[in-house]
Amino acid sequence: MDRRSDHRFAFDEPVSATLLEHDTPPHSGRFVDISQHGMRIVLNSHVDIGEVMKLEIGDHLMVGEVRHCEPQEHEFALGLSILTWVERSELARLMEEIGAGGSAYQSRSPFMVVSAPDEAEAETSPA
């Protein structure tokens, strides 16, 4: 019996998955399904529970935490909880706003934006 309360939507898309806390090359695999809070992907290698991964699927960038990893024939099925999700175009727009002074970003953001020290201050500060 499936205990999930969220409806899952099936997909069959390529995914590039990178472990964020390790200096390893990205894993390639398949994006299998998604729900409001989680997703399932299939990779050719085992990933430890608790690892945080960056996932690139088409125009989407996601960060997820591995909740389970089970062998499946010659691959591994991973269940991940979604930590964040953004489209590349939205990320580019946010970066452009930040580069332009960030005024539009600051007015919509509930977070405080800390600016870098100006060049004169940086030059006189000890290294």
Image (spheres, rainbow, N blue to C red):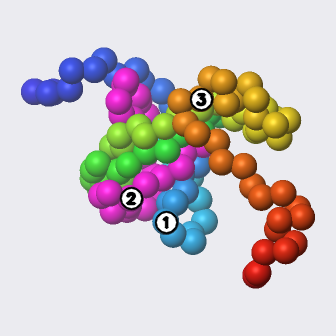
Can residue 15 be spotted in the picture?
no
Q: Is residue 124 magenta?
A: no
Q: CA distance from mark 1 to mark 3?
A: 27 Å
Q: Which residues are magenta?
A: 32-56
Q: Earlier in the sequence, mark 2 or mark 1?
A: 1
Residue on which the image places disc 2: 51
Q: CA distance from mark 3 to mark 2?
A: 28 Å
Q: Is residue 40 magenta?
A: yes
| Residue drawn at point x = 75 percent, y = 55 percent | 116
Contact flag, marks 2 and 1 (Cβ < 8 Å): yes
Q: Amino acid at mark 3?
A: Ser
Residue on which the image places disc 3: 109
Q: Secondary structure at mark 1?
A: loop
Q: Residue 25 or 109: which is nearer the viewer?
A: 109
Label at residue 32: none
Residue on which the image places disc 1: 21
Q: Residue 52 or 24: which is nearer the viewer?
A: 52
